Image (cartoon, helix red, strand yellow):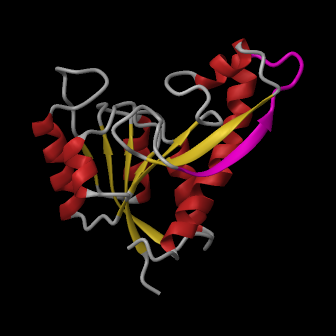
Amino acid sequence: MRKLRIGVLGSGKGSNFRAILDAIAHGRLAAEVAVVVSDVEGAGILRLAEEAGVKNATVIDRRYKTRLSPETEAELVAILTEAGVELVVLAGYMRMVKAPLLEAFPRRIINIHPSLLPKFPGLEAWRQALEAGEKVAGCTVHYVDAGMDTGEIIARAEVPVLPGDTAETLHARIQVAEHRLYPEVVATLATSDFR
């Protein structure tokens, strides 16, 4: 069976990328990571890619903090296209995706967000949930559109908010759920007709 070629974009340490690599290694995900791209020099996700023997690159746009210029995003599209990427997986990528990438990969960009969307989009969603007094938090995998965490929802996983939870303890439990859910969703897409 032909494996789905994925491109992973990340800004941080790469824990969701590691979960995807583990799922591939254990035969739970029929995919191969074609390339990893970060917008942060020396990001942990790049080190993980190097260790796994995965092609990787850094695409930085110092003019903006939360997005890329159209020219820089076109450079990112070129890297993904050249690598034969079929599905773009955002794994802690801290920039908004705009037209060049959305047009190059229509309905083929997914993200995982640490809340039960549509509640608590944006940064530190676990802290937002805690401060709002939620009894249940979690994570959501969704298609990416031009908005902030507004794309069509694919799947969710719930995590209870426990008495005495801090932002750190809740976030850690949500990450455990993310590391299970994200590879499962990618595996489902790998066997679907979305290609």
> Is residue 158 in the magenta section?
yes
Judge from the rendering whether residue 134 lies leftward or rightward of residue 83; answer left or right.
right
Image quadrant where residue 172 sits: top right
Judge from the rendering whether residue 137 lies leftward or rightward of residue 52; answer left or right.
right
Q: Residue at x 16, y 31 (%)?
A: 69
Residue 96 percent coordinates (x, y): 33, 33
Residue furthest to the right in view is 163
Q: Is residue 104 above or below residue 24?
A: above
Residue 79 percent coordinates (x, y): 19, 54
What's drawn in magenta, residue-wise?
153-166
Q: Residue at x 14, y 46 (%)?
A: 74
Residue 112 percent coordinates (x, y): 53, 43
> Is residue 163 in the magenta section?
yes
Residue 11 percent coordinates (x, y): 39, 34
Residue furthest to the left in view is 71
Placement of the C terminus among the 4 image quadrants: bottom left
Image quadrant where residue 5 sits: bottom left
Please name whichever residue, 144 or 82, is drawn nearer the observer in this view of the structure. Answer: 144
Q: Is residue 128 above or below residue 59?
A: above
Residue furthest to the top in view is 131
Please name whichever residue, 138 or 107, is drawn nearer the observer in this view of the structure. Answer: 107
